[in-house]
Image: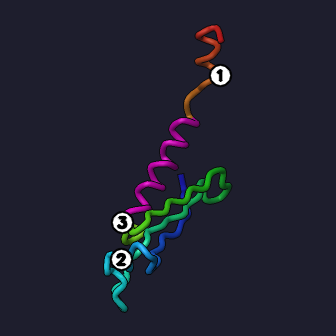
Amino acid sequence: IAVAGKTGTAEYCDDVARKANKCQFGAWPTHAWTLAYAPYDDPEIIVVAFAYNGGEGGTVAAPVVARVIQAYFELKSIDLAGQNAASGG
């Protein structure tokens, strides 16, 4: 399944980071995020993952998004109608 997406890294300095003395100019802590949709040519699912203080999006958030999309299509492929008929439901 063709997937399209974008990873991102966002620097931040909030009260939590300030109290932990992490707000250093030029080396601020970062949030990680990734957005993806599939299938690329006719989307039916979009997934966004955001990890507070997660570092880089491609490292932290992208695997989460990939697994959610994979699970979606795995579950979609299950023949629920056939299972219901076989069980009398």
Disc 2/disc 3 C-alpha distance (Å): 26 Å
Q: Which residue is mark 3?
A: 59
Task: Please identify the residue farthest to the left as the structure is shown.
Answer: 21
What separation in Å lies between label 2 and label 1 (alpha carbons)? 55 Å
Q: Whole-Å distance between the Cαs marked 3 and 1?
A: 38 Å
Q: Give the residue type at disc 2.
A: Lys
Residue 68 on the magenta span: yes
Q: Position of residue 28 (x, y in %)?
A: 37, 83
Return the disc, 2 or 1, that comes first in the chain's sequence: 2
At 56% from the left edge and 34% from the top edge, which residue is drawn? 77
Q: Which residues are magenta?
A: 60-76
Q: Which residue is mark 2?
A: 19
Up/down of 7 relative to 82, above or below? below
**Residue 10 image point, x, y percent:** 47, 77
Secondary structure at numbered mark 2? helix
10 Å crowding of disc 3: few (<14), some (14-19), many (20+): some
The foreground one among 4 and 51 is 51
Return the disc, 3 or 1, that comes first in the chain's sequence. 3
Mark 3–mark 1 CB contact (< 8 Å): no
Quadrant assignment, res 85: top right
- Of labels 3 and 1, the one closer to you: 3
